[in-house]
Image (tube, rainbow, N blue to C red):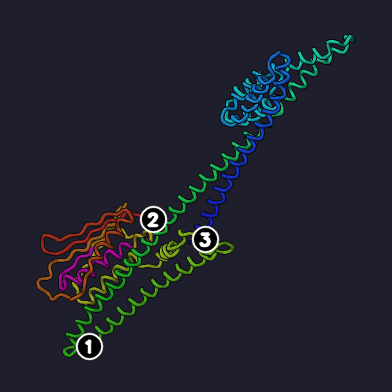
Amino acid sequence: MTTTGAHEEAEGLTTRGFWWWRRRRSVVLDVGLAVVSALECAFEGIRFADSARLPMALGVVFGVLVGSVLLLRRRWPMAVVLVSVAVTPAEMGVLLAIVGLYTLAASDAPRRIIGALAGMSLVGTLIVVFVRTRQDVSGVDIDSARWYIPLIAVFMALSMSLPPVLLGLYVGARRRLMESLRERADSLEQELSLLADRAEQRAEWARTEERTRIAREMHDVVAHRVSLMVVHAAALQAVALKDPQKAVKNAALVGDMGRQALTELREMLGVLRAGEQQAARKVADAGSGADRSTVPLASVGVAAAAAAAAAADDGPGMEDIEALVGQSRDAGMVVELAVHGVTRAYAPEVEQTAYRVVQEALTNVHKHAAGAKVMVRLAHREAEIAMQVENGPSYGAADAGLPSGGNGLVGMRERVLALGGVFVSGETDAGGFRVSAVLPYRDAA
């Protein structure tokens, strides 16, 4: 079991135990209050039966029944208050009235109902106290002693009605506030869980995008250089004995291609290592002073992608396409380059994508159409840059024997579509193949 699972289970047991204890405590409290109220009303029922000339047993039974109503205070607090108001003329149910008013004020009953019932209880208590006090002092001959009767009645009525109502209102408001805070905490926990799930999805998306980008870069870098190396090696093998000088030249070209491939691979690995170091620093910063097992998932894979994007400025651009075409010419390909429009600077990602499209198209010609004539066209337009690489049929020329995984066209399409461009490829009517791409203009920042 994980630490989190054990904590949640312990918390659940604690919550269930606390609920059971709170429920038992409430039952004990209600039963105790009902017993005390029943005893009080029973003694007061004896006095009421005596004044009403009723059997004492009837007064006791009536008092016990009235006091036992307090058991229903949590379920029907309004009924408890109404019963206390009804028995106020019998001068019984003091505890019943106080506890009933408190419970009613602490409940979720509307304020107007609480005010109305509290007012009824106040008026009833005021009248009973006033009448009872006046009866008690009726035998006093001094008239000046009667002035304090209304004051006593008001004081007694307020002291029996106002404190329980105010205390109940405070307790009810506090309970509702705690429930609101608890609901808000639960909602916040759900939102945090949802954000964590989204962060997990974003991190997985970033890792997938990074793997795709690495695969695309590896394919573009390695496939083109190795294809040229294979072509030069085949030419070297063919002319090794017939033309030693040409063989030396081809050997030098093979070495140059190999060194360039190693240089580009080294640069790519440097970018990846820089991204890994940046991600490691983020993980270390996030984990310092906290649990090392809880690391933001969004930091995984994103740093490498950011470092790769920052290194895009150092990649090949439009000015390198002429050298790229020259390398294919040196490998024996008949290729022409035509540039239309005024050359200008584009955003690094646009220039790099244009270069990679031309590079991959020439690589495919080396692989599948050895000996075919190739035409490379670049058109600088007002709002876009267009490129087209078209080759004719190979006319039975020997295949270079290079393997193909079918990822070249997919990678070109992904690059172009990622920038909002258009990519089209397919065979021509003459039996050749054409690759066309249009990229929207983005100014170099």
Q: Which residues are magenta?
A: 352-376
| 3D distance between C-alphas at marks 3 and 1 | 73 Å
Q: Secondary structure at mark 1?
A: helix
According to the image, label 3 marks what residue?
3
According to the image, label 1 marks what residue?
245
- Residue 396: x and y in percent read 9, 73
- Residue 179: x and y in percent read 57, 39
Prevailing secondary structure of the magenta residues: helix
Is residue 54 one of those drawn in magenta? no
Residue 123 seen from this side: no
Q: Earlier in the sequence, mark 3 or mark 2?
A: 3
According to the image, label 2 marks what residue?
443
| 3D distance between C-alphas at marks 3 and 2 | 53 Å
Choose mark 3 or mark 2, whichever is in front. 3
Image point (48%, 61%), residue name: 1
Residue 272 seen from this side: yes
Is residue 372 one of those drawn in magenta? yes
The vertical placement of 203 against 403, above or below, is above
Image point (43%, 65%), residue name: 304
- Residue 318: x and y in percent read 32, 64
The vertical placement of 145 against 18, above or below, is above
- Going by the numbered disc 2, the residue's amino acid type is Asp
Residue 185, by quadrant, is top right
Q: Earlier in the sequence, mark 2 or mark 1?
A: 1
| Of the pair 222 and 234, the residue shown nearer to us | 222
- Going by the numbered disc 3, the residue's amino acid type is Thr
